[in-house]
Each structure stands twice: as structure tokens, then as C-alpha cells.
Image (cartoon, rainbow, N blue to C red):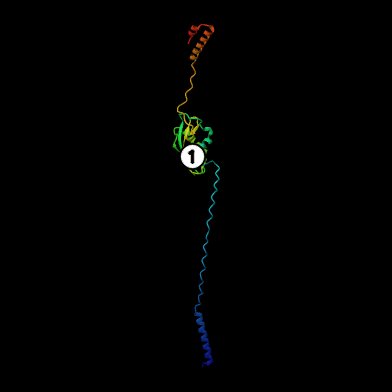
Amino acid sequence: MMTARHGATCAAWAALGLALGLAGCSTPPKPAAQAPAPAPAPVVVAPPPAPAPAPVPEFTGKVSLASTEREYRRDGAAHLYERYADRIYRGKLPPLLQAVGVMRLTIGPQGELQRLEWMRAPDHVPHVKAEIERLVHAAAPFPAARRLGSVVYTDTWLWDKSGRFQLDTLTEGQLDRLPAAAAEPPKPKARARAAAKVNARTAVAQSGAGPDAAAQAPR
């Protein structure tokens, strides 16, 4: 027969087994969820600094203080006359010119030649047209129009067959007609007749003949 002590021992073992069984069937608790790490701050890349503008070279050429296109035209013509002093026709031009050309120039703030255009081109003499264009390009820079900035002006080229020229703005004028040709020297026969008359009169005078003899000398 089971004693009381034996029953208590069995009950204790049963309780222990139940506790172990329950412990084995229980689910372990989930670990607490961690808060998400904060997103890194965006990296802002500064754009590279803009390159510094190139310094504008100081203008050392001629300066025009003209306030109008007409005033600047005189400065432009004077500049060409100074540049090509040996090509200027001195005095009045002959009535017949080899070429007449009307040209319009656009001059920039620094006196640079920005544009050249013909309003009336001397197309009948292409070499003269090309020479005028060459002279204009080679004369740049022109006087800088300080009060006007850029300026557009027109002038007329008066070209002589000698290769010299005048500009209408500074022209000395033009002859109405060709100068009269020098008188032709007397022909040989005329000179001989004139000499014979002089010799005859001289001979009569030396012989002492009267006026009637002198009158009969050849005329």
C-alpha cells in the first residue's frame, strides 16, 4: 500500500514535470524593435565659382569727342589723311576721276572696324575697290567715339588715276575743266621764214639804205 510519504513524493515529481513541460512549450519573447537610424543629411556640393572676367585692356588709341555722326566723320577722315599722308591728292582734283565710291563704316566703342559696306561701289575698277578696302582695314583702329559709343558714318572716296585720293569730307574741290594745253612751238618752216625776215631787215639797216629799201625786205 502506497504510503503518504510516497504519495507526496510522486505529487512533487508530477508538479515538477508539469512545470518543465510548460516551460518547454512557451515561446520566448521577441526582442524589442529598434528605432530606425536617422537618414544622413544630404550633402550639398557648392558649384565652382565663376571665373573672373578677363580685364579689359586700357584703350591707348585716339579718342574722338564728337557728339554727332557729322562731327565724327571729320575725325574719321582726318585719321585716314594722317595714316596715308603720302597718298593724298594735294590741290584741286582733275575734272575726270578714275573712281568715285561711297562707303559706310561701323566703328565700335574701342575704335575697332566692325563693318564695311559699299553704298556705291566702283565696280568698274575692281583693283581700286580692293585697294580702298585694304586701306580702310589697315587704318583700324579708328578714333574711339567716347560720347557716341559705336558710330556709323558715310564718306565718299574721290580716286585719281595716279593712285592718290581725297575724301569728300576734306576735299579741296575739283577743277571744272582740264588746264589749257601749252602753246605748241612754231614749226621748223615757220621759224626759218621768221629768221629770214629778221636777217633781211638787219642787212638793209646795216647798208644804210633808205626806208624804201627796208620796206621791200621780205615780210
* Closer to us: 104 or 90: 90
Secondary element under disc 1, as helix, strand or loop, is helix
Q: Residue furthest front?
A: 211
Horizontal and vertical percent position of residue 132: 49, 35
Image point 53% across, 34% down: which residue?
85
**Residue 57 to residue 36: above or below:** above
Horizontal and vertical percent position of residue 165: 49, 32
Mark 1, residues whose alpha carbon is within 10 Å: few (<14), some, or many (≥20)? few
Image point 51% across, 88% down: which residue?
11
The number of numbered discs placed on residues in the rendered structure image is: 1
* Closer to us: 111 or 47: 111
**Residue 151 to residue 14: above or below:** above
Is residue 116 in view from this perspective?
A: no
Q: Which residue is mark 1?
A: 71
Horizontal and vertical percent position of residue 60: 55, 42
Is residue 99 in view from this perspective?
A: yes
* Closer to us: 66 or 187: 66
Mark 1 residue type:
Glu
**Residue 183 to residue 134: above or below:** above
Horizontal and vertical percent position of residue 59: 55, 44
**Residue 27 to residue 104: above or below:** below
Image point 53% across, 8% down: which residue?
205
